[in-house]
Image: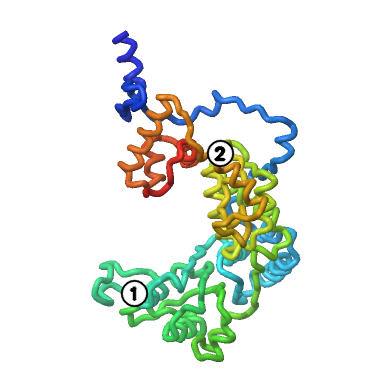
Amino acid sequence: KEEMLDTRFSQLGHRVFPVEDIHHGRRYLATIVKEDRNARTTIKTRKNRDKMIVAPTNIPEKKSLKDLSGNDPRMAFNVRCARRIVDKNISILITGDTGCGKEVFALAVHEASSRASKPFVALNCAAIPESLIESELFGYKSGAFTGARREGMQGCVLKSSGGTLFLDEIGDMPLNLQTRLLRVLESKEVLPLGSQTPVKVDLHIISASNRDLKKMMSEGTFRDDLYYRLNGMTLTLPPLKERRDLKDIILCVLATENDSDQPASIEQKAFAKLTEYSWPGNIRELRNVLRTALALSDEGVVRLSDLPREIAFGDGFDSDMGQADESSVMDAQSAELEPIHRSPLENAEREALLQEIERNHWKMTVTAEKLKMSRSTLYRKLKKYGIPITPG
């Protein structure tokens, strides 16, 4: 028996946890192992299969203009216009709500042009402090200011020479830098901070904004001459809720966010709720929702209980939960939350899992790496044992 115990103990590896069953006083040695999906069998009836929608496979990492056209007339119009001017050295201004895919569209334009072999450099003007944006954009020479790198820095303008410079949230660029950028566009030269010698650049700019630049011009917060330089053509991306190909986009994002070897799928009820939701955060919000839903799902099947409450229950969701469809979903969810009589070994695994999570300060990605399992598997175990993803 001792030999058998030693052998089994050595097979467990280095993450072994002593635990005690508080109900019976028995002691166990427990470890956390990756779920063996091949050893599991799932029996699905034809009825259940019919209720699932399977996401497509082989989705390209980079979206081409053809991919972005989809089945939406406004996107098809944008793609058609972009193709006609792609190599005409015409600046493009992309407008639209936050999160509707302006940078993805700009990258697709770059990839469709003769500049595709050169760099695509993106700079978010709203994400960089005003004190740093000048050096990020134009670069600097060694010793240009206190704290500058010894070797200096090549700014985004120089990095993108020959390729495409994408200026996101251009409306947040300070007025003094708007003047400098206009000078670069007119002279086709850039003067890094601390340098006396301008450098020639081959510049093509695509800019984007979710703000009303014409209104900013009338208020004096955006330069008229820069606007007309950047606005060779304006392309407006529709918000996600207005896209005619919304269903296709949901399935495409579901496929790209799936980190499993098996195709992801979604329950029809959950899919209907996603198509009814208003998506104020557009595609960016959709990605976050489906990434989390897949992590919480069982066997890569997204169900209604895996979605955020404001989506599952509608925009009018409140704590009273008065509507019938809401209560039916809550009944399904509450069944999972009822006290479960687990086996001693399951209690041991839950305790060991909690210890590892606390040891990693509730950082789930780190915990999954330490336990040599995917985040999806970890989240399934959290759901199984009723462990929250945040402390408290």
Q: Considering the image in quadrants, where does the N terminus appear?
A: top left
> Is residue 308 something that shows in the picture?
yes
Find numbered disc 1 in the image and state the secondary structure of the residue it sits on.
Answer: loop
Q: Is residue 34 above or below residue 145?
A: above
> Is residue 110 something that shows in the picture?
no
Residue 140, disc: 1
First-in-chain label (1 vs 2): 1
Q: Position of residue 321 (x, y in %)?
A: 59, 55
Residue drawn 24% across the image and 75% down it: 146
Q: Amino acid at mark 2?
A: Ala
Circle 1 crowding by C-alpha within 10 Å: few under 14, some 14–19, many from 20: many
In which image quadrant can residue 47 be found? top right
Residue drawn 56% across the image and 53% down it: 308
Q: Is residue 370 left or right of residue 116?
A: left
Residue 199, disc: none
Return the residue nearer the eye: 141 or 328.
328
Find numbered disc 2 in the image and state the secondary structure of the residue it sits on.
Answer: helix
Q: Position of residue 337 (x, y in %)?
A: 51, 40
Q: Is residue 20 left or right of residue 50?
A: left
Return the residue nearer the eye: 209 or 241.
241
Q: Is residue 157 above or below residue 362?
A: below
Q: Position of residue 159 (x, y in %)?
A: 44, 67
Q: Is residue 319 left or right of residue 390?
A: right
Residue drawn 68% across the image and 56% down it: 275
Return the residue nearer the eye: 168 or 377.
377
Return the residue nearer the eye: 224 or 250.
250
Q: Is residue 280 above or below residue 53?
A: below
Task: Look at mark 2 in the image and give the residue it sits on.
Answer: 335
The residues tagged by marks 1 and 2 sit, at their Cα atoms, a distance apart of 61 Å
Q: Amino acid at mark 1?
A: Tyr
